[in-house]
Each structure stands twice: as C-alpha cells, then as structure tokens.
Amino acid sequence: MAALVLVEHDNKSLKDATLVTVTAAKALGGDVDVLVVGSSCQAVADAASQIAGVRKVLLVDDAANEHPLAETLSGILVKLAGGYDAVLAPATTTGKNVMPRVAARLDVAQISDITAVISPDTFERPIYAGNAIATVQSSDAKKVITVRGTAFDKAAASGGSAAIEKVDGAGNPGLSKFIGQELSKSERPELTSAKIIVSGGRGMGSGENFKLIEAVADKLNAAVGASRAAVDAGFVPNDYQVGQTGKIVAPQLYIAVGISGAIQHLAGMKDSKVIVAINKDEEAPIFQVADYGLVADLFKALPELAEAL
Amino acid sequence: MKIVVAVKRVVDYNVKIRVKADQTGIELAGIKMSMNPFDEIAVEEALRIKEAGKAKEVIAVSVGPAQAQETIRTALAMGADRGILVKAEGEVEPLGVAKILKGVVEAEQPQLVILGKQAIDNDCNQTGQMLAELLGWPQGTFASKVELGAGEVKVVREVDGGLETVELKLPAVVTSDLRLNEPRYASLPNIMSARKKPIAEKTPADFGVDTTPRLKVLKVSEPPKRQAGVKVASVAELVDKLKNEAKVI
C-alpha cells in the first residue's frame, strides 16, 4: 500500500494544505510519497523532504511548469499513478482542477473533499453544502482523492529526511497555455491558514467600508474574508469568499460582521473553533451558530472593537 | 458552431434539506427541484455567445430521471434550441455522466461544452474535468469570464490566490463559476414556445455506458450541530469573553 500526494506550492514555499493531505494519506496505512511539479522549485522539494513520515519526494522541475496546467499536470500524475494505490491532492483550486482528469484517465471514481478516512476504502465527505455527511466506500482498485484542508491535522513540517528523486514530466499536449494571473497581494495571513479571520458581508455596504474590517484584522493579525453577497456586490475580490463554493476555513476565531448567515456561507466556516457574529438584525441565522453574538450597528461596533484590541 | 450545455436536476438551492431517519440518503419526497444554479450560469453563457453571433445552436443535455425533462425545458425557455434527455434512474456518478456526455459530444460535434463547476447536491466538482480528459480536450474550469475567438477561447478562472487566465484551443470544455454572468429569467412567451422545442430521449446504453456506481453510500448522516452561544451586550464584554473565557485573542 502506497499513496502519492500532490504538493501545493508557489515554486517558493509549500502550502499548509499539503501537510493536511499528507496526514490523510498516512491514514490510508501505507507509505506516502509526494510529488512536486514546478519551475525552480528545489526549495519546495527540500521542504517536502522534511515532512514527517514522507518516504520519497518526486520532483518535476521544468521551466514549462512554472504555472502547471491541468492538461500537463494530469499527464504526470497518470504516468506515476501506476506505482500507487491512491493519489491524493488538497481540495484547492489546483487539486479540484486536475484530479478529476486523473480519475477519468484511470477510469475510477474520484472521492472529492474527504473529511475523514474510516478505512483504506471508506471515507466521509460533506454533501449538500455540508448539511449532510456521506460515508462512501470505493470499489475501485486505485483511489483518487481530494482532501478538505480543515479536516485533518497538519503533518509535522520537520523531522523527515526523504530522498528527492527527479522524474521526467509528461510534456505539454499543446492544448492550452497560461496567459497571466492577477493574484491579490496582501501582507495579511492567508485565509485558509489564518488563526483568526474577520469577514464582512452585504451589511458592509461598500468596498470602502471594508477598511473598518481591515483595522480590526490588523490588530489581531487576522485574514480578511467575505460572504458571497459581498463579493458579488463587488466590495472585495473573489478570493476573499468563504463558503461552499469559495474557501473552506476553520480558524481559532471567526468574526462575521454584517453577514446574515446563508447556508452556503455557514458551509465554509462552521468548523471554526469560536465564532463571533456582529449584526444589527437579531434574527439573523448567523446567531444560531455563533458562540458570541453582538446585536449592534457594525459602523459603531467595528471602530470600538479596533480601539479595544 | 454548436455549444452543448449540461444541466442537472437538483434540490432547489433554497430548500433546507433533511437527512432520512434511516440514514440512507436525503428526504426528497415532495421537495422542490430546480436546475443546478451553476448550470443556469452555463446556459446563460452559451446563450450570450449565440446572441453575439458566435454560435448557431445551443443544445441542453441532462442525465437523470424522466423529470429531468423539466430541467431541460427550463434551459429551452431561457433560449436553448433543443434538448437531449439521457434517461437514467438512480444515482449516476460524475464519471458515468462524463462518459455519456462524451457520447453526446461525439454525435453532435460541438466546439464548446459548458457545464456548471459543481452540482449543489453532491458537491463533487468533477464532471467537466472528466469530460475534457475523456475527449482529450483542454479545460477552463471555474470561469468568471469567457472570450471566444476563432480557433481558441480565453478563460479567466477564479483560483485560490485570485484570477488566472488560460487560452484553450477549440474544441474545449468550460465550467462556470458564480460570477461568470447573471442568468436571465425565462419570459412567459418563451416558456410557452419552449414547449414546442424538441427533446430527444436517449439511454446510457445508446452510448455504451455502464452507469453502475463505483462508490457505495454506506450512510448519510447529520453533521454535528453547533449550539448557539450567548449574546453579549457590548464590544467591551465581547473582548472580555474572547480574552478570558474563549482565550482566543
């Protein structure tokens, strides 16, 4: 029994989602190898080799893979999959993009977004935006799995000493090319790994008003998030979105401001350790999941909060 | 050129679902069903491309029970030209749907297939990518903008860090994210005229596809419930609780 984990990285550092996925892979009970595909990404491979419990790091380092495309990445994974019983990736936009291609090529069902490993062939995964949990058993010989980033503990990032083995890529089939990217730049922690998140919703009224959220976030060294309503209204960019179809987060503290608590938003944050809701509507559903609720005008409460911290 | 759009019949997004007492699934009796919201966005995008004069025909395809015909009718009322219903009882997994859609694509020869990025029932987020792989086509998933050229399509994708733009050679598969467009409502005259638009009926066997599930659902259970906590009266009390009771700041 052996599993291969696709490493999530930006060619410089390894993302925490990788460590979570390694934990899920270990729960399958066999050896765990990891695959780094990128360009000038030796530092990532070095970091991956330190992860506790990793047997081997496979490295495809090639200028063509600076921004790996699904069509290229799936070719590499399919080529390597022969040696493994399971192939796993974090359920990030990268993992979600590539893994179904791998599953289709291997003619197996993908098991998406698992939140628990019951046995090597049985898993739990949320359905209906997390309003139900399905326990599913796979009859396929090879498992293709994506792993929810909040559902498992992170594997220790140090203590391992895996060998790094360079492997060949699979070539670009020439069907697609990377044109460009606009990444949000922020000095704040990333949403999916932040310990504290302050999120704003439609109640914020404008993008300008998110400054009030940012002032609180800066005091707490927190990430800034948003509900779908706030993103749809153009207050903040898409990558701020927390929810069923945005990012799934589970910080120590989640402060929801001016967010009513639609099912699809709750799906993205209800596993947070402590939830605070600030909303002027005391009937807002968000209060039903909040540990601490403050019924107040956010335009008064947020400056007070920034002041008090 | 033709565009194929895949649409799925799911529990309406406004319905609060209930898990069956015997844990075999979700209570579906008497529940309102609708087109998967991401698929509505996919239909809208196909229609806009057609209305811009870049496509001749939009074909709506659904894999599901007989009632999935209503979902196709919705797409036809929005403006799609014709429908294909691939009748299949019981759960058809994304891999099975992708194989059926591959058969449809081979028969219809579209240049573009647009699907919702995921269905809000099983939240799998697989079908579009699987179809692209089976066809050997490129994919532009989680699209927030689609620009169709002569032999290629440029897709702006919503990714974890922000936005990414890729260029795909046609034919290609695109999956829609939330902000690609705002789907139109079907007008009454269009709903009436949609009744006359043709829907062809097929079965998975017509495409040589075995839809036997690979995953066995052992049980479906309620997620652990969160208890509502306490209301605090002031910002000062909130800060005090977070510091001294919850100890998270």
Image (cartoon, coloured by chain):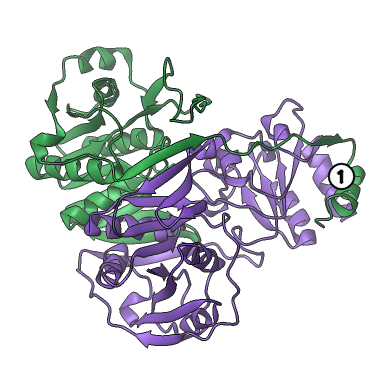
Chain colours: A purple, B green
Q: Quadrant of the C terminus of chain A?
A: bottom right
Measured as percent of width and height from the top left, residue A138 is found at: 35, 50
- Which class describes the residues within 10 Å of circle 1: few (<14), some (14-19), or many (20+)? some
The residue beneath circle 1 is B238
Amino acid on which disc 1 is placed: Leu
Secondary structure beneath dot 1 equals helix
Residue A65 vertical placement versus B131 (above, below) = below
Q: Quadrant of the N terminus of chain A?
A: bottom left
- Which residue is more in the foreground, A104 or A292? A104
Residue B62 vertical placement versus A112 (above, below) = above
Residue B13 showing in the rendered view: yes
Q: Is A172 left, or right, of B216 in this rendering?
A: left
Residue sitting at 17 percent across and 58 percent down?
B136
Residue sitting at 60 percent across and 52 percent down?
A249
Q: Is A298 left, or right, of A38 in this rendering?
A: right
Tag 1 subunit:
B
- Which residue is more in the foreground, B140 or A156? A156
Measured as percent of width and height from the top left, residue A153 is found at: 60, 62
Residue sitting at 28 percent across and 66 percent down?
A177
- Which residue is more in the foreground, B116 or A21? A21
